[in-house]
Amino acid sequence: MVGNAIKAIVYQYPQHEFVFLTRTNCELTSRMSVLTFFSSGDNRFDYIIHLAAKVGGLFMNLDSNAELLLGKGYKVFGIVRRTSLLYSYTRLDHIRPKLKLRYGDLSDSAGLSNYIHEIVRENQGFTILEIYNLAAQSHVKISFEIPEYTADIDGIGTMRLLEIIRTLDPGIRNKVRFYQA
């Protein structure tokens, strides 16, 4: 169901480039795989928005990955759930001032929209704007216990992001690369 909804959005906007990372092109839980992906000349971008609702995926190795991205001159923005353990990780202390993290949630359309529009407004002149959606309620047992929440975050949350991208000015929208993991 979610796949069909995303597919419909992609087909509706053929002029946009949507890239969906899967385990075949980047193992997001593997530090080396992510470092290799971002080191590739084809994957050099000016800005990255990393949306994550839980500690996992890239956030598990955020210190290494963020250091790499920051070292390449990227500006790294992120949305973190208030209940996330991310802020308690002391291993991020040395780069935390350089990360632009904000509390938020994929269930909050207005908050997501405000943040993305704020980033665009305050960072004019970027070449590419990458948005990575690594947020998910991914625990299988829990997903069966709270299926509506799971669908809201994993499915509708993705559609919220795509809708926000769709509403950007065409000149900005054409510079957006959306990655769904």
Image (cartoon, rainbow, N blue to C red):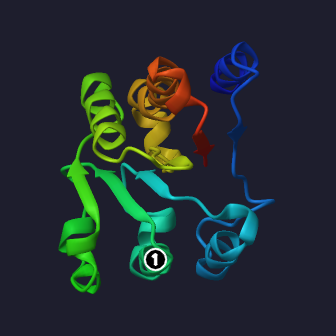
Residue 41 against residue 48 in the figure, above or below: below
Question: At 78% from the left edge and 61% from the top edge, which residue is drawn?
Answer: 25
Dot 1 corresponds to which residue? 61
State which quadrant residue 2 falls in.
top right
Q: Secondary structure at mark 1?
A: helix
Quarter of the image for the N terminus: give it: top right
State which quadrant residue 37 falls in.
bottom right
Q: Residue furthest front?
A: 125
Q: Tell me how many marks there are.
A: 1
From the viewer's perspective, is 125 left or right of 176?
left
Residue 5 against residue 130 in the figure, above or below: above
Residue 71 against residue 175 in the figure, above or below: below
Residue 85 against residue 138 in the figure, above or below: below
Foreground residue among 54 and 41: 41
- Tell me which amino acid carries mark 1: Asn
From the viewer's perspective, is 119 left or right of 141?
left
Coordinates of residue 74 in the picture (x, y in percent): 45, 66
Coordinates of residue 132 in the picture (x, y in percent): 52, 49
